[in-house]
Image (cartoon, grey):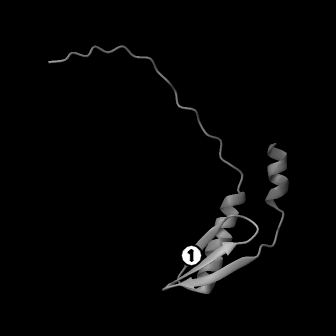
Amino acid sequence: MRKMGRLFQNMKKSFTASVWQEEKMYVAQCLEVDVASQGETEQEVLSNLQEALELHFENPVATLLPEIKKIQAEVSVA
């Protein structure tokens, strides 16, 4: 599985974005993938969307399972 992740790491894909302005902010929505972003300018919103897409397709980091410890405790009620 790791080899496959490296293979996709160097691939490039183009995406289409819909960009609109809401009050003072711009919003960009990728039409092919459910990823969106916002920014103060059109250039910023597209840059933010690119970063969001890169993070979306990034290989997941392995999750560490919590270590469960059994303890004994005495509890008294007043």
Quarter of the image where the N terminus is located:
top right
Residue visible at 81% across and 52% down in the picture: 6
Relative depth, front residue between 45 and 59: 45
Could you tell me the amino acid type at mark 1? Gln
- Compared across the picture, whether 57 is left or right of 69 comes to right
Image quadrant where residue 49 sits: bottom right
- Compared across the picture, whether 66 is left or right of 28 comes to left
- Compared across the picture, whether 7 is left or right of 19 comes to right
Q: Secondary structure at mark 1?
A: strand
Residue 33: x %, y % from top left: 73, 64
Where 13 falls versus 45 (above or below)? above
Quarter of the image where the C terminus is located:
top left
Residue 40: x %, y % from top left: 53, 83
Image quadrant where residue 57 sits: bottom right
Residue visible at 80% across and 50% down in the picture: 5
- Compared across the picture, whether 8 is left or right of 55 comes to right
The residue most toward the left is 78
So how many labels did they put on this image? 1
Q: Which residue is mark 1?
A: 38
Image quadrant where residue 43 sits: bottom right
Where 19 falls versus 1 (above or below)? below
Label 1: how many Cα within 10 Å (few below 14, some 14–19, many 20+): many
Residue 54: x %, y % from top left: 69, 64
Residue 45: x %, y % from top left: 60, 79
Residue visible at 72% across and 51% down in the picture: 59
